[in-house]
Image (spheres, grey):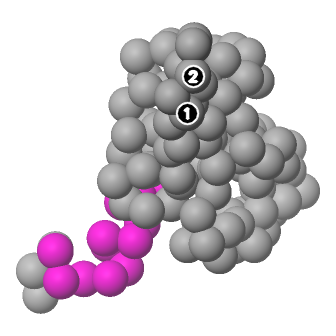
């Protein structure tokens, strides 16, 4: 089966990096946010990487970018219906990671 035709591989590739999951999580908990708000919430991500992740998530229809023709221009990001539908599963993964943090991070015996 080709990679592009495998829904599991293709679906997982949308979340294969830590930044995409964190962007989705911040938009889920924070609602509609501007770029600066996301950058402030995610202090350890560079602006370039945040821009790359936002574009990728938008191209995969998980987030929506709204541009307002104002002076100065305003851009806001929010989850799409597709992005919102993924959040219960992502939230379950985050909860599992929190619950088992000590086990996951302890050195092997």
Local secondary structure at mark 2: loop
> Percent position (x, y) of residue 84?
67, 68
> Percent position (x, y) of residue 31?
79, 48
Residues rendered magenta in the picture: 4-16
Left or right: residue 88 versus residue 100 is left
The answer to which image quadrant residue 91 occupies is: bottom right
**Residue at (53, 54) in percent of width and height:** 63
Q: Which residue is mark 2?
A: 70
Name of the residue lying farthest toward the right: 99
> Percent position (x, y) of residue 69?
51, 28
> Percent position (x, y) of residue 65?
50, 44
Give the vertical position of 10 relative to 96 (above or below): below
Q: Which residue is mark 1?
A: 68
Task: Find out whether residue 100 is within the magenta segment.
Answer: no
Local secondary structure at mark 1: strand
Task: Find out whether residue 8 is within the magenta segment.
Answer: yes
Give the vertical position of 87 relative to 1 (above or below): above
Give the vertical position of 29 relative to 87 (above or below): above
Within 10 Å of the Cα at label 1, are there few (<14), some (14-19), or many (20+) other Cα atoms?
few
Look at the numbered discs 2 and 1 and tell me whether their residues touch, using CB distance below 8 Å: yes
**Residue at (75, 72) in percent of width and height:** 88
């Amino acid at each position: 089966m080709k990679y592009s035709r495998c829904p599991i591989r293709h679906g997982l590739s949308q979340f294969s990096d830590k930044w995409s999951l964190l962007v989705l999580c911040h938009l889920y908990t924070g609602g509609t946010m501007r770029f600066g708000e996301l950058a402030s919430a995610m202090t350890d991500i560079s602006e370039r990487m945040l821009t790359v992740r936002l574009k990728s998530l938008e191209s995969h229809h998980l987030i929506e970018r709204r541009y307002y023709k104002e002076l100065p221009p305003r851009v806001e990001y929010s989850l799409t219906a597709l992005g919102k539908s993924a959040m219960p599963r992502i939230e379950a993964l985050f909860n599992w990671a929190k619950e088992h943090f000590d086990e996951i991070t302890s050195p092997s015996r």
